[in-house]
Image (spheres, rainbow, N blue to C red):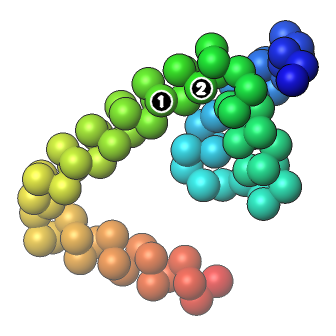
């Protein structure tokens, strides 16, 4: 198995946030996953960032938003859907 090139790592790292946010096309996801399977350095970075994202999401689930804020968010979402 070939080792990934520096360019491959740089390209994978540049797309890591989009990968974690599930904002990539199926083809790009496949490329990132193939790279992560080959590159221990990027896989470690992915694991670290994914852990932070997971911990942050868990913390945010415990925070209660004021009802008026939730109403404003719902209204803004509805307005954006009408555009």
Residue 47, position as x, y percentages in the image? 47, 29
User: Is 46 left or right of 28, judged from the image as shown?
Assistant: left
- Nearest to the observer: residue 7 or residue 83: 7
Please give the residue where the numbered disc 2 appears in the rendered image: 43
Q: Is mark 2 on a helix, strand or loop?
A: helix
**Outermost bottom residue:** 82
Q: What element carries label 1?
A: helix
Quadrant location of residue 56? top left
The image shows residue 66, relative to residue 79, as above or below, that is: above
Number of numbered discs overlaid on the protein picture: 2
**Outermost front residue:** 1
Residue under the image location 36 percent in, 80 percent down: 75
User: Is 51 left or right of 49, judged from the image as shown?
Assistant: left
Residue under the image location 22 percent in, 48 percent down: 58
User: Is 25 left or right of 71, judged from the image as shown?
Assistant: right
The image shows residue 40, relative to residue 38, as above or below, that is: above
Neighbourhood count class around disc 2 (C-alpha, 10 Å): few under 14, some 14–19, many 20 upward:
some
Residue under the image location 78 percent in, 50 percent down: 30
Please give the residue where the numbered disc 1 appears in the rendered image: 47
Q: Which labelled disc corresponds to residue 82?
A: none
Question: Alpha-carbon distance for marks 1 and 2?
Answer: 6 Å
User: Is 51 left or right of 34, judged from the image as shown?
Assistant: left
- Nearest to the observer: residue 72 or residue 30: 30
Neighbourhood count class around disc 1 (C-alpha, 10 Å): few under 14, some 14–19, many 20 upward:
few
Residue 61, position as x, y percentages in the image? 19, 56
The image shows residue 19, relative to residue 26, as above or below, that is: above
Residue under the image location 64 percent in, 45 percent down: 19
């Amino acid at each position: 198995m070939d080792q990934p090139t520096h360019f491959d790592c740089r390209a994978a790292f540049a797309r890591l946030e989009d990968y974690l946010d599930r904002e990539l096309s199926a083809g790009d996801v496949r490329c990132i996953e193939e790279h992560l399977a080959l590159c221990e350095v990027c896989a470690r970075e992915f694991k670290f960032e994914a852990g932070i994202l997971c911990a942050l999401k868990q913390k945010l689930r415990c925070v209660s938003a004021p009802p008026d804020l939730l109403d404003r968010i719902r209204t803004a979402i509805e307005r954006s859907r009408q555009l």
